[in-house]
Image (tube, coloured by chain):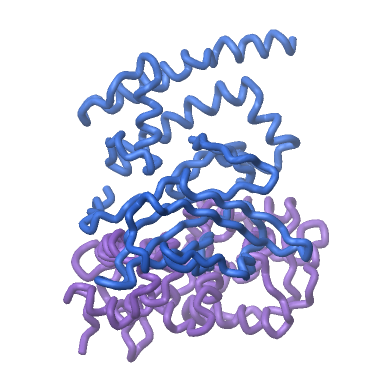
Amino acid sequence: MPVRRLNYTARRRIRRDDVSLVIRRDSDGSLTFDAVMQLEQYGFPGDARVFVEAYRQTRLMRFDFGTVSVPRVPADRKLLVFEDETEVLFRVRVTATSGRPGLLLGEADQLRPRNPTEGPDRRVPLLPPVPGDIGEEVWRVEFEGAPLLRISSLLPDWKQTVRSEAFRAFVYPAALRAILQRILYIEGYSETDDFSDWRSRWLLFATRIPGAGPIPSKDGYDEWIDNAVAAFSRLFAMRSRYTAELKGAA
Amino acid sequence: MKVRRFTPKGLSVFQQFLDSCTTGSPLPYPESALTDPSLAEAISTDVTLERRAFATRFELAAYLDDRFEAAGFRPPQGDGMLWAWIACFYFREICPVNRRGRLDPGASARWIPQSSDWRRYYRHLIAGPYSIYQAHRDNPRRALALLCQRPGRPGDLVEQLASRQEIVTNRAVLAVATAWFVDPETGMQRRGANSKGPGGARRFYDVIEQFDVTWDLSMVPEQDLRQMMSAEFAPPA
């Protein structure tokens, strides 16, 4: 079980809604990004530095966006070390320069950028489907922080597959079970009050499914997960919709 | 031999070979898959690799960097067919052998990259060390903590530290890890580095993760980080 990390210095979590990131291709084909941050309401010192980091695996680019009181958008925001825009994640960090220099005052992590054609969306997708080469597997749940639903990009039409009732019925209840087991058993996490934490968002989602109920003590995890998955399947009428699809195809 | 990349059929042949190594009747090493035009295709640049042994992951990564650089080739990190071909090419040089003298390749992700899976990319025995070397190309020896191991046996230190993006990309953190976990005289990993107790990889990871909650570690100089680390991780005088 992971060791729990303590936020001794009252670092603030910057809300996802307060950061807008758009990734696009310039006319020369290079990747670049735009970032707009609303940080006034957090009470950070004016001289605190603001950084935006783009990262994936061993690749990291860090951009200096000036200070809280004097924001400065860097002219060069090209994401040169990344091959494509898929799966580039961002984090925003606000760092002290006075008092205790280097102290992390605020952070938003695992931010997924929009592309320019998408409008701002205040909803946080719980399980975004993302295509990728996963060999002979059709789907799997992957965890890099928040979970994502990896779909084989080698399918003839992965988007169509994801939309089918058969896929929904077979995959989503199993994915929900895997995610809840991961949170409760592997991560040892059972809080629902930190909306900036993906685990809280998932647990909150599960507890709000009619029939699931609140998270019990450890001894009741297995039964609660079973109940939540069954309630989830009822809520979305998984079997009925799958059956209707079968009949429609017949 | 000129570097190629597998076709889907070639990758399948390599995968079948790897799978067979976990059974009582392993298939013969698929040498022909490296050159058969239906199983491997040319890449855009002429790059030549020699079959040779490597004492460490560092030596392997430095060799590849040298060969790729000489050819003006930037291998795409996401090209699983390419990295799988290179892994197949060096399979006999780097695959560990178990106590019974049989090939023990381990998980498929060690040979065929799961580059879409963030959790496992670093496990690839070729692309893993190469990408770490590249991330610290200004001073690759800084990353020796993750590169000093034998190519086929990275161990728990690599598992613990390379799996975290914040750690593997941070210069100061890796410099401190190298100072602590690598013997400067031998260039080899210190005994106990893979232990789960004090001074081991997992404890190092936990301490750094706690610091990462409090500090912007990209702004903390190496010397300051050394002072912040408990006496547990002070390099021997």
- Looking at the image, which is closer to me, A196 or A49? A49
Residue A221, x across and y down, in percent: 28, 28
Task: Left or right? Give the position of A156 relative to A109.
Answer: right
Quadrant for the C terminus of chain A in the image: top right
Chain identifier of the purple chain = B
- Looking at the image, which is closer to me, B81 or A159? A159
Residue A122 is at least partly visible in this image: yes
Chain identifier of the blue chain = A
> Residue farthest to the left?
B231
Residue A22, x across and y down, in percent: 61, 52
Task: Left or right? Give the position of A100 relative to A27.
Answer: left
Where on the picture, by quarter, is residue A199? Answer: top left
Residue B148, x across and y down, in percent: 42, 78
- Looking at the image, which is closer to me, A19 or A183? A19
Residue B23 is at least partly visible in this image: no
- Residue at image position (75%, 36%) is A156
Q: Is residue B145 above or below residue B127?
A: below
- Residue at image position (53%, 60%) is A56
Residue A149, x across and y down, in percent: 54, 38
- Residue at image position (45%, 76%) is B147
